[in-house]
Image (tube, helix red, strand yellow):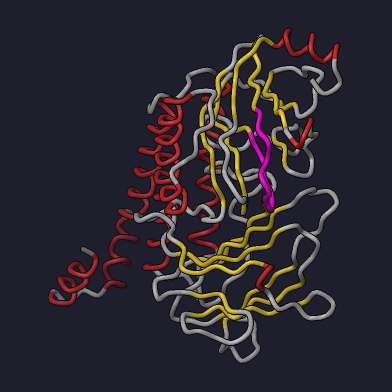
């Protein structure tokens, strides 16, 4: 459709830049931006969303966070000729069951250019780089176009390294792209955020003669594209994950494996097995999750609100992982989701929420057992805690 539109404009003697200028000065772009944001409100009002005060307040805050992320990502820092690493998802911008153990970086790129990533490894447990095409602001999902993790990095003495990012194969550390690649995502996974240091990373476009590239001046086309893509991020992400949350209600308080193809298309790591679901508990109830972790690089469990935002891990214990968990006999683990502390290890705080989504991850695991779940009375667990340290 875009191709035929461009041909039509050329036949009419109207360039893409002229058309973008006309839309900008007429106010049509701003109207479309605002109309798309207005329509995104339906993801909070409908799709089987909870109507309690906390969930609704968080829903509209969620949309405002997506607006902030969209404008920064697609308008302020969108130039693939002068990319910088930014944290699109972080402590106050969350989406799609963002992992509390992860520290995310994003940078805009183009398959038409080559790039150089330089940095130092740090002590973070896992460091992985991926290139992807598409975005939450466009159709087609986020299919991967290349991947490289720290296990495959050639690191110099002292911990420094360089990675070439290009569509054509390169020697040394190489992160592949395709002509349609539009983004680099860096995932750093902590076992313990307070004790580990993240990698220090920088990206530059090769061919800039050693100079720091200056972002291009805004044009009618770039501003039009930026505003509309930011708005589509808000509507696209909010409706996508609202649909997911609605589907998760088909198996409340259980943890079946999520479709791997669907998670990869939405930007998930193909080396991770995801178990997404919905949880709902009365004030006197608790959800008990039990499993014996297989041999794996990492695993974790997290609690989210209905909008698939991780609960506030800055102030509350809302997740547990391979490093922080207390284990029972023969390496088994029991995680307890409850409104109040049951007096047992691995308690996950609901932080005042009565329902929401949840996620279990097996990362580079030898096998993928489905965690067992059951809902019990909180009083039963408290009685158990009085009789046994480990339950």
Identify which residue, 174 or 87, lies in the foreground.
Answer: 174
Q: Position of residue 194 (x, y in %)?
A: 83, 48
Identify which residue, 104 or 144, lies in the foreground.
Answer: 144
Q: Position of residue 228 (x, y in %)?
A: 38, 55
Q: Main secondary structure of the magenta part?
A: strand
In the displayed structure, 278 sits above or below 34; it is above
Q: Is residue 113 rendered to the left or right of residue 171? A: left
Identify which residue, 90 or 342, lies in the foreground.
Answer: 342
Residue at point 76%, 49% (across, down): 191
Residue at point 28%, 64% (across, down): 22
* Quadrant occupied by the N terminus: bottom left
Q: Is residue 11 rendered to the left or right of residue 381? A: left
Q: Position of residue 302 (x, y in %)?
A: 64, 36
Going by the picture, which residue comes out furthest to the front? 330
In the displayed structure, 287 sits above or below 369; it is above
Residue at point 38%, 49% (across, down): 33
**Residue 148 lies in the magenta stretch:** no
* Quadrant occupied by the C terminus: top right
In the displayed structure, 328 sits above or below 112; it is above
Region in magenta: 290-302
**Residue 298 lies in the magenta stretch:** yes
Residue at point 34%, 43% (across, down): 35
Q: Position of residue 343 (x, y in %)?
A: 82, 18
């Amino acid at each position: 459709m875009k191709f035929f539109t461009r041909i039509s404009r050329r036949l009419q003697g109207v360039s893409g830049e002229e058309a973008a200028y006309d839309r900008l000065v007429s106010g049509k772009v701003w109207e479309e931006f605002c109309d798309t944001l207005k329509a995104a409100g339906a993801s909070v009002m409908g799709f089987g969303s909870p109507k309690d005060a906390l969930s609704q307040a968080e829903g509209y805050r969620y949309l405002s966070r997506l607006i902030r992320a969209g404008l920064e990502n697609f308008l302020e820092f969108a130039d693939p000729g002068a990319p910088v690493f930014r944290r699109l998802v972080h402590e106050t911008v969350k989406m799609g069951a963002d992992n509390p153990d992860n520290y995310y970086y994003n940078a805009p790129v183009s398959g038409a250019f080559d790039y150089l990533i330089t940095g130092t490894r740090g002590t973070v447990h896992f460091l992985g780089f991926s290139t992807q095409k598409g975005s939450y602001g466009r159709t087609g999902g986020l299919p991967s176009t290349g991947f490289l993790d720290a296990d495959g990095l050639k690191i110099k003495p002292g911990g420094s390294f360089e990675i070439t990012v290009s569509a054509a194969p390169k020697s040394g550390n190489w992160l592949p792209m395709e002509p349609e690649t539009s983004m680099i995502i860096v995932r750093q996974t902590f076992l313990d955020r307070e004790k580990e240091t993240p990698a220090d990373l920088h990206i530059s476009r090769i061919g800039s003669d050693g100079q720091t590239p200056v972002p291009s001046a805004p044009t009618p086309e770039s501003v039009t594209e930026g505003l509309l893509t930011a708005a589509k991020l808000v509507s696209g992400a909010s409706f996508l994950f609202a649909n997911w949350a609605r589907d998760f209600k088909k198996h409340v308080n259980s943890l079946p494996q999520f479709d791997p193809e669907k998670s990869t298309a939405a930007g998930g790591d193909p080396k991770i097995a995801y178990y997404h679901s919905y949880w709902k508990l009365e004030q006197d109830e608790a959800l008990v999750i039990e499993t014996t972790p297989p041999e794996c690089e990492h695993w974790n469990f997290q609690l989210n609100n209905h909008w698939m935002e991780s609960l506030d891990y800055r102030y509350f214990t809302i997740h547990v992982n391979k490093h922080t968990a207390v284990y029972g006999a023969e390496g088994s683990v029991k995680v307890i989701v409850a409104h109040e502390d049951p007096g047992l290890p691995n308690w996950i705080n609901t932080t005042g929420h009565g329902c929401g989504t949840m996620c279990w991850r097996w990362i580079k695991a030898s096998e993928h057992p489905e965690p067992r779940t059951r809902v019990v009375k909180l009083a039963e667990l408290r009685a158990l805690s009085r009789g046994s340290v480990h339950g």
